[in-house]
Amino acid sequence: MSKEEAAAPLSGILVDALLRQLAAGLPENVLAKTRLHLADALGIAVAARATIYARQVEEAQARLAGPGPCSLIGAGQAAPLAAAFANSALIHILDYDDIHDVGRLHPGTVVVPAALAAAELAGASDESLAAAVALSSELMCRLGTVCAPKGDGPGSEWFLTQLFGYVAASVAAGIALGLDCDGLVSAIGLAYMQAAGGKQSGFGTGSTARSIYPAFAAQAGVQAALLARAGMSGPAGALDGAAGLFRIYLGSGLTARQVSALTDFSRWHSLEVQVKPWPCCRLSHPYVAAAIEARNRGFAVDGIAHVLVSVNASAARLCSPLPQRRRPQTLQDAKYSIPFMTAYALVRGAPTLGELNETAITDPRILELAARIELREDLPDSPGHPPAVLALRCSDGTTHRIEFQAADLDVGVQALQRKFDDCFNFGGCGVAAPEAWSAVMAGQLRQALALARVPMA
């Protein structure tokens, strides 16, 4: 037996660390942060019920899995797997869900639906549900942090939200179901057997399916946890075995330092998860912020002759092929396009749920300005926020340089509550927003779900 085979599998090491932390109790700041992100996920899902993609997902899942005891956010019920998929899709459809910038992944859209479906099936308390969300979000953020993806290299061809989401969703559902250490290790293994997440729906154009990719992981995690609860044993070496996740998907196993980082609870990476201020791809946010700053400085669109956008390798992926990115054919492509979103913000200002819609992609002022945007890949690439620089050449011959400031993306508690209210209003149940917000802040997620009743057409 080799040293590697004799060592404890990484899945077991991680699960043991998580369960020990669960038994010791979670820090209050972690629980408070979890409640904020539960509110954010609930609000976004309520708003998304108005989209055609929500109707398409729910129709398909109703045929696949049928009715059941688990809540669909906004209205209705479904079987656990259908509920996990549909709710995950709802949280991501608008591209408004929370983000861990270093890991470049969206934990809430995966772990909240998986934990919710399992908790409702098991009759778990709201406290257990919150703990499942907190710990699985932390695990997902740590997996993203050790990967530290950039525009090329390991992780760059994968939606890490989906790839690492399979692992995190199985843990979220497993904790909510009350699985022990062996059960959670099996759940991770069974989730890994379903893992996928290639980025072609993001690199290519024309597909609307980028709006739902996290849902595959949320659903698979619930399925894996239920199989484990029924007694099925999954491969313990799912993460670090000879054909484990890191070797197969990311090219190499983890170093001892990376394994240590995954199990070190002296730092909570989930505290670094941020709420999005605008409903578009996170990599476009710095350019939107810089464009808004240009508007604030008084640059009129009619006076802008040319815009040079400096990008790094990560952001460049959102700019190619440039002709299609300048004139997106779907709203999903528009939200993922740095040239379009830069032009949008220069013309209209901050993107909102009401304004960033299907008609925006045909707005002649936006499209005319987008056609005057050129790109220069000359900025360094590193994990976290990409740098963003706009060089505006005006009709009077002057050129002005505007740089992104990270503080422009900060969303505090009051701004998050305004976003929550706006999402509820967009979803048609704004009158319930204050009480629903108070319920989530009090740790009463089920009460908030009951209040979030979207009028259905």
Image (tube, grey):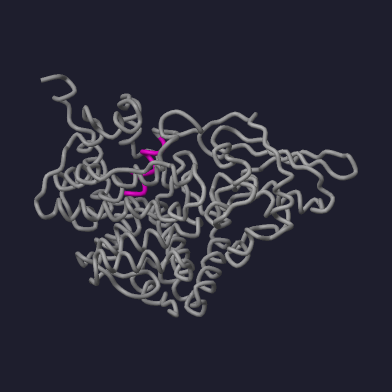
Q: Between residues 234 and 395, which one lies in front from this camera angle?
A: 395
Q: Quadrant of residue 354?
A: bottom right
Q: Position of residue 240 (x, y in %)?
A: 24, 31
Main SS of residues in magenta: helix
Quadrant showing the C terminus: bottom left
- Residue found at the far top of this picture: 2
Q: Quadrant of residue 127?
A: bottom left
Q: Is residue 334 magenta?
A: no
Q: Position of residue 447 (x, y in %)?
A: 36, 74
Q: Position of residue 107 (x, y in %)?
A: 40, 50
Residue visible at 18% across and 43% down in the picture: 185
Q: Quadrant of residue 4?
A: top left
Q: Does 54 sit left or right of 407 as displayed? A: left
Q: Between residues 457 and 227, which one lies in front from this camera angle?
A: 457
Q: Judge whether 385 appears above or below 117 on screen.
A: above
| Magenta span | 136-145
Q: Does 147 sit left or right of 311 as displayed? A: left
Quadrant showing the N terminus: top left
Residue visible at 83% across and 53% down in the picture: 302
